[in-house]
Image (cartoon, rainbow, N blue to C red):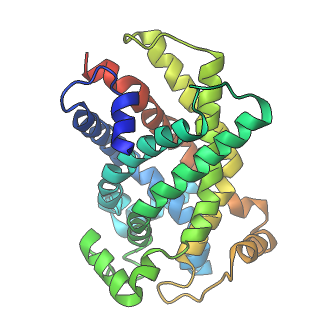
């Protein structure tokens, strides 16, 4: 059903093997972008989760200090720790993301019978986002668990490194705690990530509906237009929902690597972060995030709209 949705909605001209060509193009684009921005991603995640995995006297005080210390203490290559896992998950994630989005869009926003307006449209967009995100996360969550463990595996503090690669990390996590350990924090993660994607995709569709453009051929102004749409959507949604991402990562890393479990649940985590660190605690690593969020999300959004234009005509 989902494959039919992709073929009908993405490739109306029905070229042979266009689905797989699309997946290949998407994989290359995402792999390159994630590799380029991997250092920023690692610094961001360490700044977000360091209160759960790093002793007080060793924590980073700023983004610039984090870059300097990681380079000095762990070496240049350490900035790409966990990047291969991030690339591996592109294959299922990139396929499922747009497939699920368009499939559930047909379910909740079918325009064959009627148009939707006001609160009815808002509710349908929310249901669309929630269903899409849950479906995607159910499939790729173990990749996120492995990636987080690799990124937060710091040679100086946990010598030798606990994990030497994706397969070993996956095996050790599964051996220690089974499938439950691979899905640790799954419920909280879905609560925290849903607002981000719901806002991002809703904003994108809203902006595009207000400012339609011709996408039948590639033009410079079309390229700039989509960059602007992705940028505005990403910045607004990131600013609003970044605290949810911090809460998600704190819960995922709480109680590992010899550190005590700090949080008993979602609301307990929010309360502890606010009491100990204030609002600033919810935005750890946000500076690093700003430098990567716009170009990365631009690729995610524009692949759907431009892959046919750039690759199949």
Q: Decide which of 56, 150 is in the foreground and name it.
A: 150
Residue sticking out furthest to the left:
16
Q: Decide which of 241, 150 is in the foreground and name it.
A: 241
20 relative to 190 in the view: left or right? left
Residue at horizontal 25%, vertical 72%?
A: 167
Residue 227 in sight in this render: yes
For residue 125, above or below residue 170: above
Residue at horizontal 29%, vertical 80%?
A: 171
The quarter holding residue 83 reads bottom left
**In the rendering, at what x and y percent does residue 264 appear?**
68, 83
Quadrant occupied by the C terminus: top left
Quadrant occupied by the N terminus: top left
For residue 284, above or below residue 164: above
157 relative to 269 in the view: left or right? left
**In the rendering, at what x and y percent does residue 158 appear?**
40, 83
For residue 37, above or below residue 261: above
Residue sticking out furthest to the front:
113
163 relative to 15 in the view: left or right? right
For residue 165, above or below residue 136: below
Residue at horizontal 63%, vertical 60%?
A: 192
């Amino acid at each position: 059903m989902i494959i039919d949705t992709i073929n009908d909605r993405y490739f109306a001209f029905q070229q042979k093997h266009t689905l797989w060509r699309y997946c290949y193009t998407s994989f290359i684009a995402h792999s390159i972008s994630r590799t380029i921005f991997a250092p920023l991603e690692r610094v961001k995640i360490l700044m977000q989760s360091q209160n759960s995995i790093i002793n007080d006297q060793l924590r980073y005080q700023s983004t610039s200090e984090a870059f300097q210390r990681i380079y000095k203490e762990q070496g240049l290559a350490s900035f790409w720790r966990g990047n291969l896992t991030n690339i591996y998950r592109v294959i299922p994630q990139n396929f499922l993301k747009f497939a699920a989005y368009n499939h559930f869009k047909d379910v909740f926003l079918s325009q064959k019978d009627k148009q939707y307006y006001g609160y009815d449209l808002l509710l349908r967009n929310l249901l669309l986002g929630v269903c899409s995100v849950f479906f995607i996360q159910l499939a790729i969550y173990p990749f996120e668990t492995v990636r987080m463990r690799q990124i937060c595996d710091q040679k100086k503090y946990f010598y030798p490194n606990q994990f030497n690669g994706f397969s070993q990390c996956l095996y050790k996590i599964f051996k220690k705690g089974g499938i439950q350990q691979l899905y640790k924090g799954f419920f909280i993660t879905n609560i925290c990530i849903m607002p981000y994607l719901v806002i991002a995709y809703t904003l994108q569709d809203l902006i595009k509906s207000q400012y339609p453009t011709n996408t039948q051929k590639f033009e410079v102004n079309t390229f700039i237009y989509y960059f602007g749409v992705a940028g505005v959507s990403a910045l607004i949604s990131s600013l609003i929902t970044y605290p949810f991402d911090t809460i998600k990562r704190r819960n995922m890393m709480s109680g590992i690597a010899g550190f005590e479990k700090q949080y008993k649940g979602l609301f307990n985590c929010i309360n502890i972060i606010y009491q100990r660190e204030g609002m600033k605690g919810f935005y750890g690593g946000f500076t690093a995030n700003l430098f990567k969020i716009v170009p990365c999300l631009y690729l995610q959004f524009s692949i759907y709209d431009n892959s046919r234009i750039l690759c199949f005509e």
